[in-house]
Amino acid sequence: MFWEGAEKRKCNRIRSKILLRYHQIIEGQKNSPTFLKSFTKNISAEGLSFETEEVMTLGTEIQIYFFLPGLNNEICARGKIIHLEELNSDPAKYLLGVWFKELKGEDKKKLKKRIEMMDLLSLLQSALEKNASDLHLTYGQPPILRIQGRLHPLIMEKLGQDDLRTMIYNILTEEQIHTFEKWKELDFAFSPNPLVRFRANIHLQRGNVEAVFRTIMPIIRSIPELGLPSVMADLAGKRKGIVIIAGPTGSGKTTTLAAMVDMINHEREAVVICLENPIEYLHTNIKSIVKQREIGTDTLSFSQALRCSLRQDPDVILIGELQDSETVSTAITAAETGHLVLTSMHAPDCVQVLDRLIGMFPSHQRGQISMQLSNCLQGIVAQALLPCKNSPSRVVATETLIVTDAARSIIRENNTIQLRTIIETGGKYKMHTMEDSVGKLFNREIVSRETAKEFCRELDYIPEYAGLEDYIEK
């Protein structure tokens, strides 16, 4: 569970910021009570907490009125103060914990149901238990899990505008809320406890606050455990140059890069600087010093962090993603000055990686960039995750380009279309096409014909290149 070892409660308690009105109950009072206002800090079906400047003693009874998102009727409860904490603030404030002494049965039932619906931690727990890669919170839909690439709506009510905002804001700090409301986008890593991490993206869709949470497995799996080709270990063992992992969103690029850094960390004394947005996998120093810097928290941008990292005595630099020409230029400079640069890019195959990299620059610079890439690029691996035929899991298929002298000449001339031939005939250098990889999986009955057809025109083709047998986990 998320809160292993924490205080166990009879019902869910969520962080919340809900406006409430309250007044102290004084027996025999004839005059109309004076209402005060505050915002809840958290709430459950049994009670709530809020901040106040009023001093109240333990045992004081108060009357509370508030609305919950999705409920039209105001909830009225009689509460008893069971917790009092003075906060370090000026002017002095107090945190009050209130137990609901009296709450109408119907109101309690509605309150419990709404709180369960807004309990994001429970939804994330469900995502873990069902081995979902992603949790989607979308307006007008129930929470949706992505499991083995397919979307599975949970049997819950559809989420409304207030539901979404309350649910998502529950896990954000005040600083994160301010950042999101200013820039309309927010990326961060969320960790309910040291063993669980999620990559979160908060965004707006037609004015509604929505979110996607990507599950990050706590254990970094090795290159063989991921079923990646052995050439990945060769590339991770390079001392300088650029290695690029490509693929669409959700194809495991970050997981592959984490495995490469983990291999370096176990086998080499090196300073590894990771620039990520956000930090996903956490590395512990073993043989190497691994410094993980988060964009937006530890530094302002990839390009700025990359420039500064060159003065931090790095041997290896990991760049979460090549997003702009400035970052690409600095990465090339780092590789040219004797550093190994590991990075990723959204592209379906190796040839398109180079086309997109060079295309980031104006036409008068492309010749120079092609020349520099031809000198420092070590290899490109494109990958995709395919559903298995007979099990509820996925398997990785890859395409590999190793930059040989022939490949360097083609890149230098910016004639990237010819690289396809280099890949198809480069088996002795552990190169292979995506068609080779998927064809192998199909002929071993790991993936279905329908899946293989998306990548292969000739399904009966079996790769015969030397060294190809080891790139699929047996």
Image (cartoon, grey):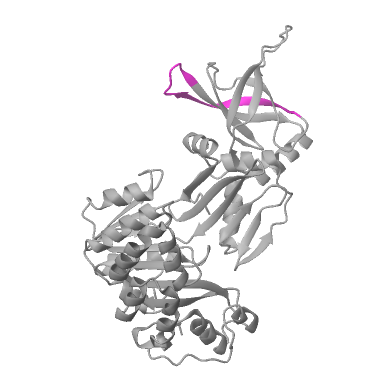
* Residue 235 percent location from the top left of the image: 32, 73
For the image, the number of numbered tags is: 0
Q: Residue furthest front?
A: 364
Chief SS of the magenta region:
strand
* Membership of 358 in magenta stretch: no
Q: Residue at x 41, y 44 (%)?
A: 296
The image quarter containing residue 136 is bottom right
59 or 201, nearer to the observer: 201
* Residue 421 percent location from the top left of the image: 43, 83
Would residue 473 appear left or right of 369 to someone viewing this image?
right
Write the start and end of the magenta stretch as one range: 74-93
Looking at the image, can residue 6 be seen?
A: yes
The image quarter containing residue 459 is bottom right
Looking at the image, can residue 11 be seen?
A: no
* Membership of 92 in magenta stretch: yes
142 or 271, nearer to the observer: 271
Determine whether 394 is above or below 206 in the image: below
Determine whether 353 is above or below 85 in the image: below
* Residue 366 percent location from the top left of the image: 37, 62
Q: Residue furthest top?
A: 31
Would residue 230 appear left or right of 391 to someone viewing this image?
left
* Residue 315 percent location from the top left of the image: 23, 61
